[in-house]
Amino acid sequence: MSESEKENAGSASLEVPEIPANDGPDAQQRSFLGTIAARLSLILLGSVMLIATASLVAYFALQVTLNYQSRMADVDMPNIVDSVQIARQSTNLVNGAFRIISAQTRQEHQAEVEAVEQERSALEGIIEELDSRSELDEYTQQIRMLLADLSAHLASIQDSAFRRLQIGETLSLLTAELAEINRGIESDLAQAIDDQGFYLVEGLRNLDESPVPLEVRASEGEFTVFRNLTVVNQQANLAVLLLDEMLVLNDRQFLPPIEERFFSALGNAQRAYSNLPAFAQLVSLGASLQQLERVGAGDQGIVELRREALLRQEQEQDSLIMARDASALLDAEIGNLGALISGNALASSDAARESAANGIVLLFTINLISAAGALVFGYFFVWKSLARRLTALSGAMREMSRGDLEVAVDIGGNDEVTDMAEALEKFREYALEVQRLNLVEKLAQELDAKNESLEATLKELEKAQQQIIAEEKLASLGQLAAGIAHEIKNPLNFIGNFSEIAMEFGKEIEELLEEIEESDAREDIREITEDLGKSLNKIRDHSKRADNIVRSMLEHSRGGEGEWRETDLNATLKQYVELAYHSMRALNTGFNMDLITELDPDIGPLEVVPQDISRVFLNLATNACQALDDKRIKDEGFEPVITISSKRLEKDAEFVLRDNGPGIPKKIRDRIFEPFFTTKEGTKGTGLGLSLTTDILVRHGGSISVDSEEGKFTEMKIRLPLESVRKEEEAAQEET
């Protein structure tokens, strides 16, 4: 900073701003209501009016509470008890229907019927009592109708269950008789079948008779008698078994097929019995078959009684379902009634509770409102308007007395305290300006000293930065030199080898010249001459290659600003990737890699600074080779590959260098272009390579981006404009 600037800054800071005067409102012009005494009087008058109002409201609230409590005790609570009893009694009626159906004897049945009748009578009595206490005709009439419907279903269940018990008693007797008939049939048939079998074998019907001839006892008629006796035995036993099955059957839909089979078996037994000759038709067996027909198929037989019992059982189930439906409707109606009664009771209870609470609150409000009013008005008018503001005013005065003039005096209001605060604020502002005038000159001097120190530090930082950049260039040059040494070695080997070959070809030509007269020797001379020309061409090509390598090294090592000229960047990219590879090979002979090129020849030469762009390509290729070598050391089966490609876009040329190395972690991917950021250990890197690369590409109007997946690949993508930015820079410099 110059001396004139310092003086101008000092004189500007010493200017004292004009402070407008603010004398505040005139105390004589302030209204009476704005005074502190008027506010205190209004507080006392409001407290007295609140006390009188609260006393009157509390008296009326207590009267309303007593009325609601009387209604709840005399009407609502008894109605609630009756509704609960109605619901309980209706449930007992339905349960009674189940008990009637489950009764096993007539005595149990009669006892359950009487119990259900008592429950029904008690329910009607409760309904009458509820009807007499309150006007609920709409609900009680509906309940009576549903109760009558339920009673009708219960009566049907009672009659059906009684008849079913009678049928059960009759079936018990028929079951015992059926067992006796079955024993008689089995006894008669067992004897008859045994006698007929003995006759067929021995030819004797009585032991005291002579045996009949074989042709007589083994006749078709005698065998038919034996078969018919067997059929009677089988069919009679089947008919008895079918009747037993009917007795335990619980589903009426299975009865017809069993009944049909019973009549078929009984008919077969009777026909087989009628086909027997007179001597085989036992009188007792015929009587047993007739009794079996009467017990099974008679009007009061097992088939008819069992059919009626199953039918009544189904009717009882249907009546029970209808009784349950009627009970559900009755329960719903009782629920509606209970909800109405409960609602009335709750309304009375809530009203009484609310009135009582209001009365209690209002009684205590007499004292609470007075206390609260005193606290509220005391806070707003005494503490907030007076005490707090006076405390703030006195605190500000104490801080000023200690030398702190930055404390603001702003207490608000429009009364006597405000006048004192405004006067103190004016004093503070004038004192603060005087203090600032004393400090300005001292601060200006300190600022000048700091500026000088910062300028010296900035120069040192710029010098250090230039030194680091130079070291980075030297490190890059060293890597380039190692690669170039390897590259130059190959052309020199070719030159030496092909020179020796050319010398040998010369000797052979001399020998052949001596034998020139032979035709075959002329052909040999021609072939040797051609081979010699090829060797000399190769010597020339490799000499040019060595010359190009040296020229590239010189361009790369030049400092300062380079010349802009058209350059084949496809060739430059490939050349410097190979140089980076041979540099790595020079450091580590075990390193090998495959280079894949996909270069677009349509890009053509671009106008760039060759040594700068070559430094960009070398930095990127060196980083890729180092990453590949690190991964190769860790993974024995790893095969390093670098792929370089280029593509002509609409306005840019795109160059891509991709390696299959370890990739860049996502957390540091955004930092790799920052100056001095490096992931290399020790002194292997300064962290300026990618930063300088970015600067070079920006000067060329280009850009660089990175895409990487950790453990798989890293891809560096460079874009340079097809039209050089040099002309734009020259035009801008001419304008400036």
Image (spheres, rainbow, N blue to C red):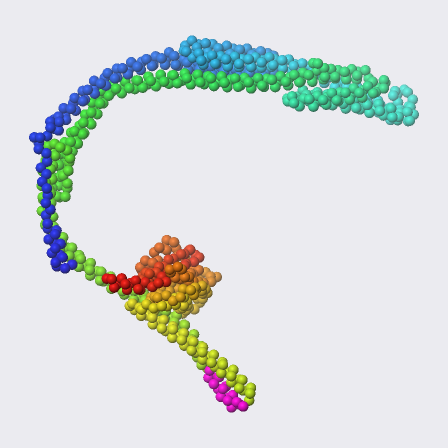
Quarter of the image for residue 255 reads: top right
Q: Give the range drawn in magenta.
A: 502-517
Left or right position of 111 against 675: right
Q: Give the residue drawn at x 64%, y 13%.
A: 166
Could you say where residue 374 lies in the image, as x and y percent from the top left?
18, 25
Q: Give the residue drawn at x 39%, y 59%.
A: 650
Q: Give the residue drawn at x 91%, y 23%.
A: 211
Q: Is residue 493 visible?
A: no
Left or right position of 444 against 292: left
Could you say where residue 733 lies in the image, as x and y percent from the top left?
26, 63
Residue 659 among magenta residues: no
Quarter of the image for residue 139 reads: top left
Q: Which residue lies furthest to the left in this view?
A: 28
Q: Can residue 28 be seen in this view?
A: yes
Relative height, residue 19 to residue 349 (above, below): below
Q: Give the residue drawn at x 31%, y 70%.
A: 558
Could you say where residue 552 lies in the image, as x and y percent from the top left?
36, 71
Nearest the viewer among 713 and 378 is: 713
Could you say where residue 247 lies in the image, as x and y percent from the top left?
67, 20
Q: On the rendered image, what quadrant is the C terminus found in?
A: bottom left
Left or right position of 367 against 431: right
